[in-house]
Image (cartoon, rainbow, N blue to C red):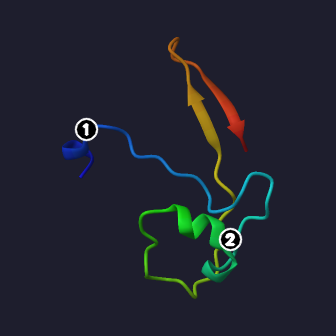
Amino acid sequence: MLADFGKPVVSTSANLTGGEVPLLFKDISEEIIQQVDYAVKINREKLNKVKASTVIRLKPDVGFEILRQ
């Protein structure tokens, strides 16, 4: 899929900036769900035990900057 698309595919956690990370699908804001093209229909009852994602920006000089941890 990525090879055919030819571009990076990125995502972040399903919460608004500064909001709580949802532990269950039902805790995701309706505002977010309305803005996506597709919400996966598996594991919607599964409890998310994963720590929130870290977001970095890659720099041209091969370094990186942490945007969110």
Q: Is residue 8 left or right of residue 63?
A: left
Badge 1 crowding class, 10 Å Cα cut-off, few under 14, some 14 to 19, many 20 or more, is: few
- Which amino acid, mark 2? Ser
Q: Is residue 19 left or right of residue 61?
A: right
- Compared to 54, does 22 lie above or below? below
Which quadrant, please, contains the C terminus? Answer: top right
- Which amino acid, mark 1? Gly
Query: Going 64% across and 82% down the picture, which residue do you hit?
Result: 26
- Compared to 33, does 47 lie above or below? below
Mark closer to the chain start, 1 or 2: 1
Nearer to the camera, 27 or 48: 27
Pointer 2 residue = 29
Residue furthest bottom as drawn:
45
How far across and down, in percent of the image, does residue 46 sit?
58, 84
User: What whole-number distance in Å separates the C-alpha atoms at marks 1 and 2?
Assistant: 30 Å
How far across and down, in percent of the image, does residue 52 sit?
69, 57
Query: Going 49% across and 83% down the picture, which residue do you hit?
Result: 43
Q: Is residue 27 left or right of residue 45?
A: right
User: Is label 1 in contact with label 2 (beta carbons under 8 Å)?
Assistant: no
Q: Secondary structure at mark 2?
A: loop
Query: Going 21% across and 43% down the picture, which residue do you hit?
Result: 3
Query: Going 25% across and 44% down the picture, which residue do you hit?
Result: 5
How far across and down, in percent of the image, does residue 40 sit?
43, 74
Q: Give the quarter of the image for residue 24.
A: bottom right
How far across and down, in percent of the image, does residue 55 sit?
62, 42
Q: Secondary structure at mark 1?
A: loop
Pointer 1 residue = 6
Q: Give the quarter of the image for residue 67.
A: top right
- Compared to 63, does 15 lie above or below? below
Nearer to the camera, 69 or 14: 14
Q: Is residue 2 left or right of residue 62?
A: left
